[in-house]
Image: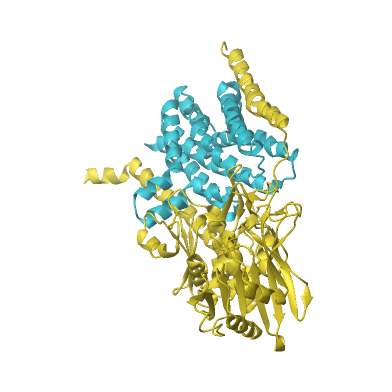
Chain colours: A yellow, B cyan
Amino acid sequence: MNKIKRFFTDKRLIYGSGSAAMTAGFIAVMVLVNIIVGVLSDKFTLKIDLTENRIYKLSNETVSIVKAVSSPVRIILFETDGGSNPRNKEILERYTALNKNLNLSIVDPVKNPVEANKYKSKAEGGITNGTIVVDNGTRFKVIPAEELNVYNQQIGALEYITTESKITSALLSLSKSADMKVAFSTDHGETPMSSLEAALLDDNIVSEKVTTLTEGFSENYDMYIIVSPKTDFTAEEIDSLDNYLKAGKNAQIYFGADTPKLPRLESYLYDMGISVGEDVIVETDSRRIVYNTPYCFVPVIKEHAATKPYTDNRLNVVTYLTRTVKPLWSERDLILLETLLESSDKSRSGADESVNGPFPLCVMATRSIDSGVKSRVLVMGSAEFLDETFSTANKDFILGSISWQIDDTSVLSILPKNVLGTPLELTLRDFQLWQLVLIVFVPITVLMFGLATWMRRRHL
Amino acid sequence: MTAIFKRELRSYFTSPIGYVFLGITLLVSGIFFVYSNLYRTVKDMSDFFNDLTLIFVLLLPLLTMRLFTEDKKNKTDQLLLTAPVTVTKIVVGKYLSAVVLFGFALVIMLIYPFVMLLYGKINLLPIFALYLGFFLAGASLISIGVFISATTESQIIAAVITFITIFGIMISGWIASVFNYPFIRYAVDWFSVFKRFTEFTAGVLSLSSVVYFLSFSAVFIYLTVLSIEKKRWS
């Protein structure tokens, strides 16, 4: 009995249990305070975006698109342990704060391969760290990490974040109804475009390979795409094409360097005001040359509704083995001709080296039909422009122009956010000076003070 | 408390330890700044501060290892505990002296953004936020060091345990990933000082992170006070 009494009156037990209870209580209060602040912070976004270009501020365009989302959309950010990118997560959280239909999940593709495999079919490089998937339950878009963060390879630093433009266009694309149909003509040795077909499907645009030789141009399709035909179109086909376009439909025609002379097709385009040259453009401006060949270069993108994201955001496309496509007038017979791409003023014509650029390379013809309907024809002097190996931006350029031609869809022009800013203007001499001051002089001065103190006090 | 704070702060500069901490911190930060910003001509200092978290592991144990162990070694802890000040004031005074020395190193490092100002227009606000985040993260880890110093007898042991603890927190995300339990990973992420600091490097000043850092320090200061109080009744 005494033992029990002693146990309960032991000072260590009394103080110890009191102290343990107080510790637990104190920690619980601190955790609770953090949870409350965390919840309030999520609800009222108690965060300040201090970045120079306000990289977390969503544009008005994004806000209106996100607010219009009426059915559940899951945004999945794939992140491996230790490989997280706080910037992408922060931007995505701002999306989900705008609309309750948007839900953000963070999934580790290594720990959860089942989830990652669900989206593998549309991820060329696989689902890796940083990949984002936007899934509306019936369709999904995969955005690879390398398209979200653009690094400056020269200095190895992150330069642009395109997360907002990519996520918003994915949401826009998923919201489109699948009522656009595109046909690829096949009877003239046209180059097959399976990657473009896949990209169209990914953008909710149905495409089919069709014969025009026997069936002509059908108004069931919103657009015909003709890629580098090797034989000419028949007179009947040209008539059918003319009727098709006059019905307010659209076309894209790509001429390759190996496309032979096609008198009927070229003559038809000539009547429309577009002249296709036979020369291949040679670029001499080294800043525009790609893959060390003057035939492969970055053209100048002209301002146009269909090129807005490129001109606004200073994005580039790459063209290869490109012929001139010249507009013969600007506006005549209800046909408006606009150049979308041209070579630089330092480019030369392969056929006549004495002739200098710029040369028009891609022209959009817009014909006004009765009752406000418009028919649009894009003619491009390079079939290789469609080759996905050159630039992913080319693919977006084509998809953007197709959407714009078919239904006037305003092309998104959300700026990629620059995180790097303008570089410091530092000479080598300045660098060497600061190297000496900051790495040698400052630390050694401090250490010398320490040494002097130690010397002075060691005999105390 | 002020007297203890002043005594501790002075003791950093009457022994080589304060100078060694400042000298090595400025050497390491100087190298990181010169090669991360000046060499690459980059104005953004988030990479610099990400790299600089290395000094948390390597140098913070140096700052905190002697705070309580030295008193125990010199037997002055009894004097301190019987002095007419509360244990809380003793702990806070000692903690603040280490925090101020750490802050002093950061104040010297403020020359870096001003060096960059000579060579281009820069926005100082996000840079100051990075300094604030780094300071708060450092102050949180110092509170761990203070606690460990109060619970061990030798400076070396205190330094080694602090080093291991901070290093453990640094790689906690990786450790948690070994266990495939989302709750553990979420909890570790939530508690990780380094994970919280990444918000600052991403250019976001968040109230929840600031509150987290302050409460983290408060918890360890409280634990330190308790561990010293315990000696009175155990």
Residue A296 picture location, percent across and down: 62, 53
Q: Residue at x 48, y 26 (%)?
A: B71
Q: For this rendering, which residue is in front, B64 or A248?
A: A248
Q: For this rendering, which residue is in front, A306 or B67?
A: A306
Q: How many marks?
A: 0
* Residue A343 quadrant: bottom right
> Which residue extends farthest left?
A1
The relative height of residue A371 versus residue A255 in the rendered view (above or below) is below
Residue B68 picture location, percent across and down: 48, 30
Q: Quadrant of the C terminus of chain A?
A: top right
* Left or right for B40, reference B163: right
Residue A97 seen in this snapshot:
no
Q: For this rendering, which residue is in front, A381 or A19?
A: A381
The relative height of residue A454 versus residue A301 in the rendered view (above or below) is above
Residue A341 seen in this snapshot:
yes
> Which residue extends farthest top?
A459
Residue B33 picture location, percent across and down: 62, 35
Residue A3 picture location, percent across and down: 23, 43
The relative height of residue A356 versus residue A10 in the rendered view (above or below) is below
